Amino acid sequence: MTISSQDAGEIAAQMHLIGRHARSAQRGIALASPEAKTCALLAAATALYDHNAEIIHANAADVETARAAGMTASYIDRLALDTKRINAIGQGLEDIAALPDPVGKVMEAWTRPNGMRIERVRVPIGVIGIIFESRPNVTADAGALCLKAGNAAILRGGSDSFETSRIIHRCLVEGLSTAGLPEAAVQLVPTRDRAAVGLMLEGLQGAIDVIVPRGGKSLVARVQAEARVPVFAHLEGICHTYVDRDADLDMAVRIVLNAKLRRTSVCGATETLLVDRGAAPAVLPTLVGALLSAGCQVRGDEATLKTDARVQPAKEGDWSSEYLEAIIAVKVVDGVDGAVGHIARYGSQHTDSIVTGSADTAERFLDQVDSAIVMHNASTQFADGGEFGFGAEIGIATGRLHARGPVGVEQLTTFKYKIRGTGQVRP
């Protein structure tokens, strides 16, 4: 049932009920067998394939509403689904089902001199609240990852993907029901009203253990400012690709074009290209020309402006912009130290890559760039849990505590200690 956006009291009552149901379901899902969780995920994938036409119909309505509201092309791209993308979501569910179950995994074990055996063991976190924007696939990814890790999930999707998310959520519930698991283990907030977000940030009277925001800067900023429970935060994806003087030019062109233009709307898209001053005369015109020819707008510093009349002058704000469109900022820097310094000043600690044939230079970059993901000779668009072998991800965490980088199944667990004795007492 969709809740009226005008009835704040009813919203609060319903949200607190969702919290209680999640807490109750989590106790059951935490003890579910790996086989039951696998069954639920595979059944959810089957339901997703079966409801393909219904999902596309609902998504068309969401896209039409977003277009009428004047949303950008990149926003529409994140929202839109077709059969290929729906099949990819289903494949993601199957991939998560195939992952090793993390619950109960012994992370480390040792025996004390007194004979006590100590194990550090993975356990579910509990109830996870996920607040996300536009991308309806997050409904499936987040629900499935939480389930696999033995957590209950409360999902609050973006208002623009509301109808699509409802159908996808229904597929997850079908999977849970097929496996005999509590259907309340994955719940979708049934209102577009933003009051529901505020209630989740308060923790739903102690029901929520952690909040995961996935969306734009304003959403993450609000979550970080207002949350009364721990947050796995993901800020902007201000990602950089640095082309070093020892880079292979053909490789650099391939990587830069892919990193920027494969999908401009993803958080792993390169937003700034940095070029070693020692390589600029030889490689900068080629890189800039390739980007322009591919339809990318280039905003450059003084050196870049000289390479092509179509380059627009970069402003200070361009170095800290997440465009999520076919726009890139280009700057010439003084070697790897200049690149590291620029990234430290303007980056968001998300994903940064170096293109170089020098192993020593690559290691300096990998060691000194303080981002969640650093790469050598690879596109920043590999910043994705699926590409890491995690099956999927809830987001890329850029904080330092608990989870960093792609938040997959293992990152959605915590641990406890199991101690086995033979009658030891402490003197």
Image (cartoon, helix red, strand yellow):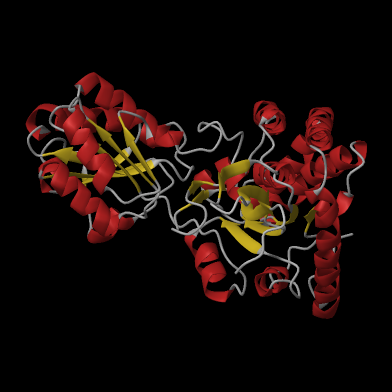
Q: For this view, does 96 lie left or right of residue 215?
A: right
**Residue closest to the far bottom:** 9
In the image, 45 versus 314, the foreground residue is 45
| Residue drawn where x is 44% and y is 46% of the image | 324
Q: Residue 18 in the image: x percent, y percent?
A: 83, 64
Q: Quadrant of residue 315?
A: bottom left
Is residue 68 at least partly visible in the picture? no
Asked whether 394 or 115 is in front, the reply is 115
Please state, as top left, top right, bottom left or bottom right, where the C terminus lies in the image. bottom right
Quadrant showing the N terminus: bottom right
Measured as percent of width and height from the top left, residue 219 is found at 55, 64
**Residue plotted at (13% across, 35% down):** 307
- Give the side of residue 365 with respect to residue 187, left or right: left
Residue positioned 47% across, 35% down in the render: 263
* Quadrant of the image occupied by residue 108: top right
Horizontal relation, residue 247 to residue 204: left or right: left
Q: Measured along the vertical axis of the image, is residue 97 above or below residue 136? A: above
User: Residue 264 at x, y = what percent?
Assistant: 44, 39
